[in-house]
Image (cartoon, helix red, strand yellow):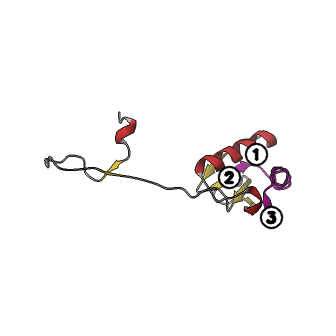
Amino acid sequence: MLDKKNKDKIGVVYSTNPDFEYTLLTVSEPETPSKNKQSLKISLDKKARAGKQVTLVSDFEGKTGDIIALSKIIKTKCGVGGSVKDREIIIQGDFRQKVSKILTDLGYKNKVI
């Protein structure tokens, strides 16, 4: 099992060079702009989901932790499940109007497509 300090090391598994230094993977996430500067798009999707409908919230800019926190708020207020994949919030079912109202109440600009 990998420990946390070694999981960011990339490239070389083993080196005989005593002066070798690992290159650490550093990912810098953009800062999250204020809520009123975000312009989120809400849409309905059922492609590749066995005919089931999901509500997608896309175009979120900012840190991964912030989008996860926003998705948790939306899922709790809608009373359904969902997830975050590829910087999109996926909510199970057709909740476009309810999600739009939730985002507006939170101060986000949004548009139902």
- First in residue order: circle 3 vs circle 1: 1
User: Given the image, on which type of amino acid does mark 2 rest?
Assistant: Ile
- Of residues 58 and 29, the one nearer the viewer is 29
Who's the residue at 75% across and 56% down the image?
35
Element on which disc 3 rests: strand
**Among numbered discs 3 and 2, the one appearing first in the sequence:** 2
Range of magenta residues: 90-113
Q: Is residue 49 visible?
A: no
Disc 1 marks a residue whose amino acid type is Ile
In three-dimensional space, the C-alpha distance between marks 3 and 1, rounded to whole angstroms, equals 16 Å
- Tell me the quarter of the image containing the N terminus: top left
Kindly identify which residue carries mark 1: 74
> Tags 3 and 2 in contact by the CB under 8 Å rule?
no
Image marks 1 and 2: residues in contact by CB distance under 8 Å: yes
- Residue type at numbered disc 3: Lys
Residue 27 in percent (x, y) is at 46, 54
Residue 33 location, quadrant: bottom right
Q: Is residue 86 magenta?
A: no
Q: Nearer the viewer, residue 58 or 106?
A: 106
What residue lies at 77% left-to-right and 60% top-to-bottom? Answer: 36
Circle 1 sits in a helix, a strand or a loop, which is it? helix
Q: Badge 2 is on which residue?
A: 89
In the rendered image, which quarter is residue 96 located in?
bottom right
Q: Position of residue 48 (x, y in %)?
A: 63, 58
Q: CA distance from mark 1 to mark 2?
A: 9 Å
The circle on residue 111 is 3
Q: Residue at left 78%, top 57%?
A: 108
**On the rendered structure, is 24 left or right of 50?**
left
For label 3, count other residues whose C-alpha is less than 10 Å away and answer few (under 14), some (14-19) or many (20+). some
Mark found first going from the N terminus, 1 or 2: 1
Q: CA distance from mark 3 to mark 2?
A: 14 Å
